[in-house]
Image (cartoon, grey):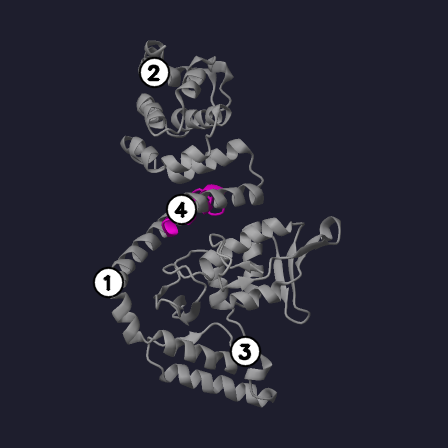
Amino acid sequence: MINIGRDNVDKSYRYKMPPLQAKVEGRGNGIKTVIVNMVDIAKALHVDPAYPTKFFGFELGAQSKFNTKDERAIVNGAHTSSDLAKLLEKFIEIFVICPTCKLPEIKMNLKTNNLKIDCAACGHTGVLETSHRLKQYIIKNPPTKKKGETKEGKSGKKAEKKEEKKEREQEPEDEEASVQPVSQAKKKKEKEEEFVTDASKEAQKKRMAEFLESKEGATAEKQKKVEAILAAASLDNKQESPATVLKVFLAERERAVSAVVSEIKRLQVSRGLDETQRVKVLLEAIFDLSDPNTIVTQIGKHAALLRHFAPERNAGLLMLGCFEELIGVIEPKLLPKTAHILKALYDNDVLSEDTLIAWHDSPPESSFMVNKKTAVDIRKKGDVFLNWLKEAEEEEE
């Protein structure tokens, strides 16, 4: 058994799940991947097994289906267990882990075409903050109850549906129908846990009042930002591009560098990106080019992430090639800022002086992202800083 949540390495951690096991079946156009133990994983995560299965399909751009009759989760195409395990980690982070206490204790409730989450551990409540397509799938496909929880026969099912409809009509607006199927024994256990943790609405408000006041505003602002990203991407038909996916990932919440690196690696694997494309996706996602005057500040803000992708000279030269395209092709208004950009990369320890000097001294025709004329213009604009850097190196010698 492994810990639920990729950032938790505590051996005594009580939230466990079995490691994902996958096997490839068929050949040619009929090749598919079967997640052998999806039911066991779903039970550990307290979710419908169709949800992570559908999540894999959305992320991989492939058809996916969970067959309830034989309990088989199938994703078209050949995929390794390790790749699917990485996607499962992302699913857990978005749909299972509480954004506040980071414990897998949230329950999803359907409310007016949206998903509300309640954490039994810390009492956090709020709307599920994601624009992932699976969210709409869950809203449109709430799980059905198990046979043991329903009345016998067709008439019993119809009567139960009428009772549920009647209850929904009589309930206040702030009460929702639970999306997650649970047995009567489990419901009893959850009630006992709620009593122990005092997860009543009054207690939650008292415990989380200050947090919710700031959180609601931040949630609305982030949601608007995500919507703006998707709207802009739709104009260029880039809703599913790797850069758009990464932009949304960054906009949804504050992300640790390790989480962003993992997401970029996932995109590289799932979209078949080479090293240059990976860096281009990173630069497109993290930089807002609407105001060239802010580029230096933005480099400082994302310096830790940029450093991860330029650990040595070769990687640094590759990054400089991508910056050449950014400056000379994608946003020419950045050309006058070239010296400032290079200095910011140097001051924030993203690129070393050896890497910068090696790039500056290389023949312009060797640039692999721009033509010779553009490469010459960029190097000329960087002369002020690079000449200063060379003089400082000579004085030290």
Separation (CA) of disc 1 from disc 3: 37 Å
Which numbered disc covers residue 210? Answer: 1
Q: Where is mark 3, residue-wise?
A: 145
Q: Are marks 4 and 1 in contact (CB under 8 Å)?
A: no
Q: Is residue 12 left or right of residue 25?
A: left
Q: Is residue 232 left or right of residue 16?
A: left
Q: Residue at x 36, y 82 (%)?
A: 171
Which numbered disc covers residue 256? Answer: 4
Separation (CA) of disc 3 from disc 2: 69 Å
- Which of the two discs, 1 and 3, sits closer to the camera? 1
Res. 244 in view: no
The kind of residue on which mark 4 rests is: Ala
| Sequence-first tag of 3 and 4 | 3
Q: Where is mark 2, residue-wise?
A: 389
Q: Residue at x 49, y 14 (%)?
A: 365
In this rendering, the answer to whether 262 lies above or below 41 is above
Q: Residue furthest toward the right?
A: 27
